Amino acid sequence: MARFVPVARIAARLHASGSLSRKLTLFYALLFGAAVALMLGGARWGIDRYAERAVRAELQAGGEIFDRITTMRYSQLADAGRVLAIDYGFRAAVASADAPTIESALDSLKRRLVLDQAFVVTIDGDLIGYRGRLDPRQAERLPALLDQGADRGVLRLGDRDYAAIAAPVEAPMLLGWVVFAKSLDEAEMTSLSQLTAFKLKPEVRPVDRVERALRDPAARAGIERIEDGERILIQTRPIQSFDPAAAHLLVLQFSLTDALGQYRPIFNILAILGIIGVIVAVTGSAFLARAIARPVRELDRAAQRVSAGEQAQVPVSGNDELGRLAQSFNQMVVDIDARERQIAHMAFHDSLTGLPNRALLREHVQLVLKNARSARRMALFCLDLDNFKAVNDTLGHPVGDALLCEIGARLRTLVGDDGFVARLGGDEFALLLPEHRPFDRIAHDIIDTVARPARIDGHRIVPGTTVGVAIASLDGSDVTTLLKNADLALYRAKSEGKNCARFFEAAMDAEARARREMELDLHDALNDGRLFLMFQPLFNLAESRVAAFEALLRWNHPTRGLVSPVEFIPLAEDTGLIVPIGEWVLREACRMAIQLPENVRVAVNISPVQFRNPGLNATILSALADSGLDPGRLELEITESLFIDNIEATLASLHSLRALGVRVALDDFGTGYSSLSYLRSFPFDKLKIDRSFIIDLMANEGATAIIRSITTLADALGMETTAEGVENVEQLDILREQGCSQIQGFYFSKPLPADELKKLFDREERKVA
Ligand code: C2E
Ligand code: CA
Ligand code: CA
């Protein structure tokens, strides 16, 4: 087990390293290693089995050879012994106990047959020709042993065992035996062992207790004994013996370990070949793994570069799965790049006109400003189309869109290659241009370019634009300031009547800041109770009485004092604050009206922003209900500007207001886009003739005619007329003459605080009374 620990540790490290090629190499190394180990184990087992079987067979064969050799030897000796025993001379010598004759016969045979002992034993136990020492008791027993009929076997003489034969000497009576013996000593055994392939180690031994068991035939094939770790195969063969009491065995031993050792070189060669095979396989698989892993690694690296935003491609080799994967990867990178470009284009371009958008303009301006030289003579022109909303509302959005595209294209042609055009959204465009010509000339070119009539979908449209200009570096060294200042200039140009250009001036910035501050203050004004109403009476000329009063908003600013509504109403409109403020005015005005005589109406100014707010009707209803004022006593003053936008929607709203039972007056009549046509479409209750006409009355003859035509028209349509801003009696006289029904102005009364208004009516009542 300990052998596998380092392998496991290496495997763990390879795994942790996360390298595909290392993992593959390790996998193949383990696989091949296991295969080779299995092969070597099998070979070893096979070799062992084969060798063992061969050794056992050899042992068996060896045993049989021993048998045959000993049988042959015994037969040779027995034949020689028998020939001597029947020799007449020899028998006579034995009968006469002629020792010299006997011994000489024995000696010559002993030499010829290479015997260790050749002697005669008489039946009395006398030994003739025996060389060596012999225990007398042993000699005494010899005749008895030899007389048992056996002619061959192991015979113990002195302290040695001999392979011996005995031939009886008879004349004709038994006289004794001729005995030939060969020592079973080491030398004999060694010479025997030379005859077998394995050099078996033979040994003849008396049978002891253990070995008796081995005489069992089953054991003949060989049993195994282990001595000091050495495996030894043993085979025994019984050997005939003269002395039945001292049986003998031929014991053949053979070291199995030695025999197997002979096969060890084969195994070693196999093992070496196996290890070489593993090394070759591992090296090969390492190369293969690296070949497989290389494209994967390249893909991995490329993917990392792509995710870091680079455009990376991998080499494509071959048409296999990896080749196709590389191809798909490259295609994917190209697609991602294309999509990113598309997204980037979408992020920086306007989808309608295809022009750069505000974000790209900012980038561009920033770039220009960074480079001081290029920024020196550059100007940013901000455009806002005049009355674009009317095009959208009257001709539909598709026409509006087409007009925007048309104007975008014109501007692009105008700026050519050295300018930059962007659409900022809605009907706003911006141009960044160098000073090829004076900037004011360029501004006029822009206005003229936009103002060319366009024909879209069969409609003839005459667009117009207002332009705000900010000069690079001079009017802003950063993009935000420059854009803001061009916007301020545009704002100013618009407020000065549109269709014109204005350059930014430092004062605009201060104004804008003041405006922003005012906006913030106005926010608090309503909650802080700093808004209040003044009331200006409207005097009915025919009835000589106050017929109504107009609620006029005032703001008592904490530091500026009274701020004119002319200043703060536009602010309130821009911020949407006009909606809650207007609601407050409505409620206050109704609350005031309910305290005055029933024949007196209250007039409330409604801003276009309020008018377009869908909650206006509900607000009016709630103000009437809360105060208990009769709807017929509330007069809403709206301006003509409402008709610029969407005549149909305006008319619908007017009718819904009328349905509430309130009166509707058209304020500042004659100043805006007065079109007499809509006077027919909606029956206003009153026209309020703008103060500018009243001022003109003194100097201008034509003004009187205008008043005349207005009152005639109003009479014809059943409308009242109120002349605004009447300041003197001369004006009053002309107005009365021209048939004006009501007058409003300082001549009769300035706007009054609530308590003074009430006092005024108290006075009137007293007058009536
Ligand atoms: P307007 O609706 O035309 O209101 C009449 C303006 O003329 C009032 O100015 C009034 O004080 C002024 N005026 C009246 N008689 C004479 C005169 O004889 N000579 C001169 N020079 N001026 C005279 P005021 O109160 O400053 O309001 C200005 C404008 O503010 C109003 O014009 C109206 O459009 C707007 N406004 C005032 N209060 C409100 C309001 O509560 N809601 C809305 N939406 N607008 C309001
Ligand atoms: Ca008014
Ligand atoms: Ca007015």
Image: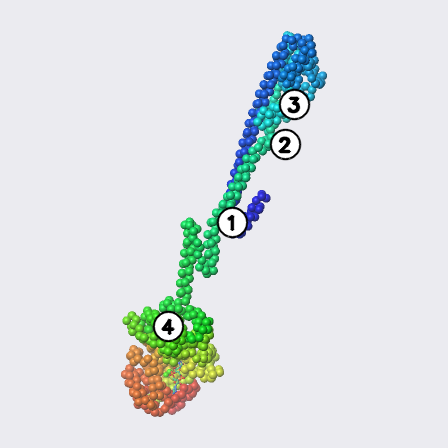
Quadrant of res 545: bottom left
For the point 53% across and 36% down, the residue is 43
In the rendered image, residue 746, in percent from the top left (x then y), is placed at 39, 88
Q: Earlier in the sequence, mark 2 or mark 3?
A: 3
The Cα–Cα distance between marks 2 and 4, rounded to whole angstroms, is: 112 Å
In the rendered image, residue 305, in percent from the top left (x then y), is placed at 47, 58
For the point 45% across and 70% down, the residue is 367
* Circle 1: element type: helix
Q: Residues within 10 Å of mark 4 (few under 14, many from 20)?
A: some
Q: Amino acid at mark 3?
A: Asp
Q: Earlier in the sequence, mark 2 or mark 4?
A: 2
* Circle 4: element type: helix
Q: Earlier in the sequence, mark 1 or mark 4?
A: 1
Q: Can residue 245 be seen from the camera position used here? A: no
For the point 69% across and 21% down, the residue is 159
Q: Amino acid at mark 4?
A: Val
User: Would you name the residue on which mark 1 appears?
Assistant: 22
The Cα–Cα distance between marks 1 and 3, rounded to whole angstroms, is: 69 Å
In the shown orientation, is residue 416 left or right of residue 239?
left
* Circle 3: element type: loop
Q: Is residue 465 above or below residue 10?
A: below
**Of the numbered discs in the image, which one, if any, rests on residue 227?**
2
Q: Residues within 10 Å of mark 2 (few under 14, many from 20)?
A: few
User: Would you name the residue on which mark 3 appears?
Assistant: 185
In the rendered image, residue 355, in percent from the top left (x then y), is placed at 38, 68
The extreme right residue here reads 136
Q: Which of the two marks, 2 or 3, is nearer to us in this view?
A: 3
The Cα–Cα distance between marks 1 and 4, rounded to whole angstroms, is: 63 Å
Q: Amino acid at mark 1?
A: Arg
Q: Is residue 446 above or below residue 274?
A: below
